[in-house]
C-alpha cells in the first residue's frame, strides 16, 4: 500500500524519548514533513505489535535501544493536497520512552537527530501537535510514582 494517496489510514507509532530535562527529536529526511523536527517513529509493519514497532523505528532512525512505557497520545494526521484529496492519513500512537542503550546517530529517513530542552523547542520547526505531546510526556513522567 502506498503511503502517499493511500487507500486506507496507515497506523504509525512514535517515541517521546525523555532523558533528564531533554527530549530526542529527528529532522525528517523524507516526505511527509521533510525537514521538520518530530519525535522518532514511523509506520507499523504487517504482523508487528505496537511496542515492537516503536522499538524498531527508534533503532532504525536513531541507533538507540529504548524502554517503552505508556501511551502518551493517539491522534490522526490527515494531509490533503491542493485538490482536497487525501495525500497522507496516519493514525499515530505515541509512547513515553527512555533510552537504555545503543549509539545515537541519524539513520534511515532521519536527516539529523538531537536532544532538545522544552525551551529550545520554540526555536525550531516541529510537527503540529508535537510540543503538546512532549509536554504531556514530561508531566506523565514527573507525576509517576517513584519519579
Image: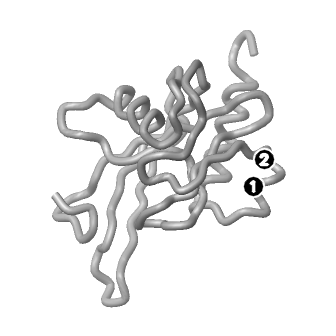
Position of 39 with respect to 141 (left or right) is: left
Please report the residue visible at 58 percent of the width from the left and 29 percent of the height from the top.
Answer: 103
Residue 65's place in the image compared with 83, above or below, is above
State the SS at label 2. helix
As rendered, which of 131 and 105 lies closer to the eye?
105
Residue drawn 51% across the image and 59% down it? 28
Query: Which residue reaches farthest bottom?
Result: 83
The residue labelled by disc 1 is 121
Q: Looking at the image, which residue sits at the far right?
A: 119
Residue density around tag 2, few if under 14, some if 14–19, many if 20 or more, within 10 Å: some
Left or right of 146? Residue 36 is left
Foreground pick, 109 / 143? 109
Quarter of the figure with residue 102:
top right
Left or right: residue 63 compared with residue 144: left
Q: Position of residue 57 (x, y in %)?
A: 41, 38
Residues marked 1 and 2 touching at CB (< 8 Å): yes
Q: Position of residue 17 (x, y in %)?
A: 61, 34
Q: Which residue is mark 2?
A: 118
Say whether residue 37 is left or right of residue 3. right
Looking at the image, which residue is at 42% across and 39% down? 60
- The reply to whether residue 69 is visible in this rendering is no
Q: Nearer the viewer, residue 64 or 72?
A: 64
Find residue 89 and report its horizontal and vertical position in percent: 33, 62
Question: Residue 115: x percent and y percent?
Answer: 71, 42
Amino acid at each position: 500500500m502506498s503511503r502517499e494517496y493511500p487507500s486506507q489510514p496507515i497506523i504509525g507509532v512514535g517515541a517521546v524519548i525523555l532523558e533528564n530535562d531533554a527530549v530526542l527529536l529527528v529532522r525528517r529526511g523524507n516526505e511527509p514533513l521533510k525537514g521538520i523536527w518530530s519525535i522518532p517513529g514511523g509506520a507499523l509493519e504487517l504482523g508487528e505489535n505496537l511496542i515492537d514497532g516503536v522499538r524498531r523505528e527508534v533503532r532504525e532512525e536513531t541507533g538507540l535501544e529504548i524502554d517503552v512505557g505508556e501511551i502518551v497520545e493517539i491522534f490522526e494526521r490527515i494531509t490533503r493536497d491542493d485538490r482536497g484529496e487525501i495525500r497522507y492519513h496516519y493514525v499515530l500512537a505515541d509512547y513515553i520512552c527512555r533510552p537504555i542503550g545503543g549509539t545515537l546517530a541519524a539513520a534511515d529517513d532521519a536527516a539529523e537527530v538531537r536532544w532538545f530542552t522544552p525551551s529550545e523547542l520554540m526555536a525550531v520547526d516541529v510537527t503540529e501537535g508535537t510540543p503538546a505531546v512532549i509536554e504531556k510526556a514530561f508531566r506523565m513522567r514527573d507525576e509517576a510514582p517513584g519519579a
